[in-house]
Image: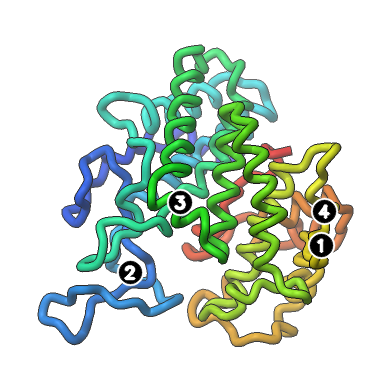
Amino acid sequence: MEKAQAALKAPVLHITDLVSSRSEGGPHDYYSNGDYWWPNPDTEDGLPYIQRDGQTNPDNFNGHRIIMCQMRTNVVHLTSAYVLTGEELYADRAVTHLKEFFLDKETYMVPHLQYAQAILGVCSGRGIGIIDTLHLVDVVFCIEHLKHCRAMTKEIYTGLKTWFCRYLGWMLTDPNGIQEMNKDNNHGVCFFVQAAAFALFTDNERIVDFCRDCYKKGLLNQEAEDGSFPRETGRTKPYNYSIFVVDNMVSLCHLLSKPEDNLWEYESPAGRSIKKALDFITPYVLDKSAWPYEPDVMHYEAFPARTGYMMLAGCTLGREELLTLYDNLPVESTDEEARRNIATRQPLLWM
């Protein structure tokens, strides 16, 4: 309620509020730079940028990501207050945020990420950039909770569904989207979290089934015999990324499970499962000093942070230790990296 009061007073944000001179798109096109790319010290103009994995360049443009995340956060807090109290003023403000960000002619965001995570001197955008809209998964749950409020007209609701339908279509057919879909690390997982959530919201059962099949036959193959994810433990931020990939695998189990096909209980022919992944990571979020890999090169002290998977897996699988951890961690991290990597701001809206 405290956050909702602040969100009532917060300005309505739009993708058009900031324009980067680096973007090859227009004012309605989302734009960002790859986080770990830096000016080339061997060239006069710094181009092409070079990668320093795990080390975030503070001079890169991330203004659109911040706007999108703040919009999401405001909508989540306002929707939560509406669910708790039934007071329409919270819903009114939440719908205003949604309408202006996604639909209004002067301020809408185009439903694609053609220019996300661009690398200066290399490319104008990449498939990897699709991870930036992971924060919009919360938004579709909010829209459903707001569906019958007085401010959510049929026109607005239909418009929002159309926006996410078009974005999902772009994700599934654009070369950038297809590239991201086939990534064999956390990026592939996060692609399917979005695809599953947006397909459920837009009643696209064919894509929901496709996502479920890809979880079983593709994404679980990222898991090692001990439940770890080698593509994440091999990074320069293995602790952060290991938690992150489990968080999103849990999200997929929550989104895609149904009584006759329960992914929480599913085990692949090779013995891979979400339970095994949780068995691997849980001891290290409970006792970070036992972490057997190198510490992260940056933001190591920010983790573990309160993360949605602790609530979802804790409730669904009866893992009390995860629920206790969720309760004991700070309600909200002050570290920007941790906030960026937590896709679910309020998991109770998912349940």
Q: Give the residue at mark 3.
A: 178
Q: Give the residue at mark 4.
A: 266
Q: Give the residue at mark 2.
A: 58
x and y percentages locating residue 189 in the rendered image = 59, 56
Q: Are marks 1 and 2 in contact (CB under 8 Å)?
A: no
Amino acid at circle 4: Tyr
> Does 323 sit left or right of 154 as displayed?
right
Task: Work out whether residue 164 can be spotted.
Answer: yes
Which element carries disc 1, helix, strand or loop? loop
Q: How is the image coloured?
A: rainbow
- Whole-angstrom CA distance, mark 4 to mark 2, is 41 Å
x and y percentages locating residue 343 in the rendered image = 57, 52
Q: Nearer the viewer, residue 250 or 221?
A: 221
Amino acid at circle 1: Pro
Q: Quadrant of the C terminus?
A: top right
The image's mark for residue 269 is 1
- Whole-angstrom CA distance, mark 3 to mark 1, is 26 Å
- Whole-angstrom CA distance, mark 3 to mark 2, is 29 Å
